[in-house]
Amino acid sequence: MLSYRHGFHAGNPADVFKHAVLLAVVDAMQRKPKGISILDTHAGPALYDLGHDFARKNREFERGIGAVWADPPPALASYVDAVRRHNPDGTLRRYPGSSQLLRDRLRPVDRLTLCELHPTEQKALAARFGSDRAVEIHAGDGYAALAGLRTPETGRGLVLIDPPFELKSELDDLVVALSAALRRFGHGVYAIWYPVIEGRSTTPDALPDRLGLAPDAWLDLRVRFRPEQRLGRMSGCGMALVNPPWSAREAMAGIHACCDAPSARP
Ligand code: SAM
């Protein structure tokens, strides 16, 4: 069941879109001084070695971060800078995942909680953040952590939900946990990544109704990959936001415009 390893996909076009939007959301939330509690429900292993056999198998990163590394469009510049921090000599060798990108953005007032089920990824997180007082690692189910979420002391929180979508029940599991979280922390910001896969129902179109969300509490940003970026049957992906910080609207629109295939736009 735990066969998914993100190391095969790190830095691919889906990661570029997901991580650029994630950082834009964090940056917008950090315009206010109050601390933010961040929960990454499906953390993966912090840093990915792009020279590892996993990454080299399909070299998905070449179609993602590799394509914008040398000359990023302005809308992706801040995200590419965040990746550069882990490649100080200018050669792309390592890719920071969500947990590392979020840790790098933390201010002293912010806190980060990471959940992960896979034992190998748990070890990587512990090695990287085990002695970091700003980070808490839960070696367990991210949906259980989400379902048990409470309003943070500062009243400000962000949750990244980045599941592998291996199970058919993924969206149902997500709705159950997110409903519980919203009952206790209704004004939190929730960012849900999802793939668009031919022949499968992975898009969260029914979520606003199922969660009883007001129209302005939902923003679904979806991109289609260019033909050369396609990842098997995955033809695109999206980031759906509950309670999107509207001050990030312009940054997110710029990222969307960069990542959505031009030929797919009307
Ligand atoms: N967020 C990571 C990043 O940006 O680098 C990638 C995450 S990857 C798409 C999904 C991860 O979730 C995998 O590492 C997998 O082991 C883990 N996972 C799967 N089901 C989980 C669950 N119910 N709770 C916590 N982690 C889970």
Image (tube, rainbow, N blue to C red):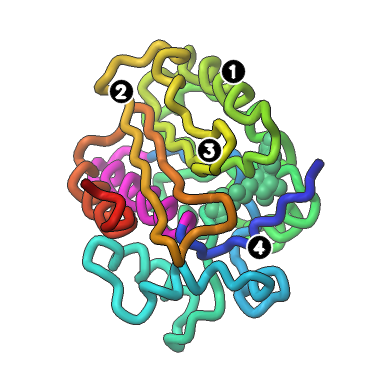
Would residue 137 be visible to someone looking at this image?
Answer: no
Marks 3 and 2 sit apart, C-alpha to C-alpha, by 17 Å
Give the labeled residue for mark 2.
Answer: 217
Query: What segment carries the magenta color?
Result: 14-35
- Is there a contact, CB below 8 Å, between mark 4 and mark 1? no
Residue designated by label 1:
176
Q: Quadrant of the N terminus?
A: top right
Give the image location of residue 192, x and y in percent.
47, 36
- Taking the image as shown, residue 23 lies to the left or right of residue 115, namely left
Calculate the distance from the C-alpha at mark 1 to the C-alpha at mark 2: 18 Å
User: Which disc is residue 161 wearing?
Assistant: 3
Tell me the tag on residue 7. 4
Please name the residue shown 32% across and 56% down the image: 261
Disc 4/disc 1 C-alpha distance (Å): 28 Å
At horizontal 65% and vertical 75% (from top left) the residue drawn is 56
Q: Residue at x 52, y 16 (%)?
A: 179
x, y percentage for residue 50?
60, 75
